Amino acid sequence: MEILLASAIGILFAAGVYLVLRARTFPVALGLTFLSYGVNLMLFVAGGARLEAPPIVAGAAPMTDPLPQALVLTAIVISFGMTAFLLALAVRAHADRGDDHVDGTERAP
Amino acid sequence: MSHWPIAPILVPFFAALLALPLNLRGQRIVSLAATVLLALVAALLLARAHGGAEVYELGNWPAPFGIVLVADRLAALMVAVGALVALACVWHAARGWDERGRDFHALFQFQLAGINGAFLTGDLFNLFVFFELLLIASYCLLQHGGGGTRRIAGVHYVVLNLVGSVLFLVAVALIYGALGTLNLADIAQRLAHAGEAQMPAVHAAALLLLVVFALKAAVLPLFFWLPATYGAAAPPVAALFVALSKVGVYAILRVHGSALGTDVALAATLTAWLMPAALATVLAGALGALVAATLRELAGYLAIGSSGLLLTAVALGGAEGYLAAQFYLPGSVIALAALFLLADGVAACRGEAGDSIARASPVRAHVFVAWLFFVLAIAAAGLPPLTGFMGKALLLKAAAVAPSAAWVFAIVLVGSLLTLIALARAGIAVFWHVSDAPAAAPQPWRLAHPPAALLAGALLVLALFAGPVADYAARSAAALAGGAEVASR
């Protein structure tokens, strides 16, 4: 369980970092999405990975920590809004410049 | 429990909602009224916080389970400085800049709500949420007025800050995983009892947070976005962004200084990273100011240098370091914000030449602009009689006993000299060394004297009442440093 979650977080971060460093705006937006997936999973695990336990404090019964789930929910909403804004901005920049390079225009090598 | 600590967040928030459906005239009235109200609330909060810190539990949930707002002296001071700068920015924008795009005032008020929230919150995740609120508003404000340069600068700014947000959340996850709490006061307490196994995660989280806040505060090597962004923004927006960059400094003081810094080993690690970065930023800001081509670029680099000075004071730590930081901050933020507004006023008088630091037609018609520049340059360079000088003197006094004293003295003094030369050069080029070409007819709506004069007046008041201000800052610093000592026992 832990090894699965940990490697999933690692792969998501690796893919995200690679894509963020690309030169076109669309892969960059995609990379940020991967990064936010990775970080959401990480927040989720922060309270301890526990299977089949309710997120409620009920006496001595085993329970999962409900707080990380609330944090993840907030983080998902925020990253969704931010990504939407970035995409809208990137489309406008593309329309203005006729180029989707992150610097506006391709520099000659 | 009084409800005043949440008022600086609610006033701009509801003003923004109220302004959205109105026409421009209505928006201006709502925005100006709300900002004046905010300034009054901030003044009240300042007076109340001087009596003692107030903790506001949202929804009456007891800390550390609920989210708290903490209105102590430092938070109240930041809110008050932000409100004053915002008042001048709204005033200047209402003279014409807000016609250039839609919903300027609503976005501006949302941004204020985010800034005040970040100043007042006592919870790490809540700090993240308010950061995002102020960032999304700043993304939109940066686009105000449109244009291709602004859009590309916007893409860079958004991507950088989104990566910053990701790092912030990673740090939040690590701290929650290691300590089981996100309340800043609670973090300090649990840190004292944390076992060896948890410390590596906390160290990693603390350094990640340092990167995030340093990005916001524009610290070397993370400041390259700032001149481009501030240069692309509309002047009233750029002036508010000066206050925005100090949110990063504030967060470092709050999170690293008084929460995570309570652990001795952690504090040593943080100082080892923060001090060289802060000193390098002072130097980089001063060098950038020397080569700046326009007045706004100059003000942008001065903002970087002032972040560097403030972080040097924070890195020195202790009551004396925090005193220097808090005494230097208001004057510096107000002067630089006014300089951004004044640059627009200068550009309005010079036609094609704009605010470039070059030989052009005289600004003769507006001698008052030159006088304002003189006052603001004295404040920004840190010369007596204004408070920048006292702030730097306090900083050097705090550094005298530190092991890094030689570096701090050398770099702060050289940086100040370079800043002085840069400002003198700009003043000579713009106001004295003028061409014979007839003065261009000014665009009256861009003339920034009244708002800039408001800020310059505030600087003079600050200098006149330096005694009470220093007393306030000293008590606040003692409380911050004292809290750190109590928790480390």
Image (cartoon, coloured by chain):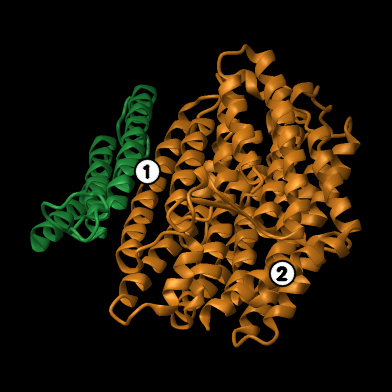
The residue identified by callout 1 is B159
Q: Of tags 1 and 2, which is closer to the observer?
A: 2
In this orientation, which residue lies closer to the viewer: B282 or B323?
B323
Q: Which chain is home to disc 1? A: B
* B339 relative position to B268: left or right: right
Image quadrant assignment for residue A4:
bottom left
What subunit carries mark 2? B
Q: Kindly report the distance in space between the C-alpha atoms of the residues bearing marks 1 and 2.
A: 34 Å
Residue A25 quadrant: top left
Residue B18's place in the image compared with A39, above or below, is above
Q: Secondary structure at mark 1?
A: helix
**Rendered image: mark on residue B324:** 2
Chain A, hue in figure: green
Mark 1 is surrounded, within 10 Å at the Cα level, by few (under 14), some (14 to 19) or many (20 or more) other residues, namely many
Callout 2 amino acid: Ala
Q: B192 or B294, which lies in front? A: B192
**Location of residue B482 with respect to B343 vertically, above or below:** below
Task: Look at the image and tell me whether residue B224 can be seen.
Answer: yes
Q: Front-most of A82 and B477?
A: B477
Q: Residue furthest top?
A: B23
Are both tags, 1 and 2, on one chain? yes
Residue B425 shows in this picture: no
Please provide percent x and percent y for residue A42.
24, 55
Relative image position of residue B230 (x, y in whole percent): 57, 42
Look at the image and give the colour of chain B: orange
Q: Is residue A105 left or right of residue B301?
A: left
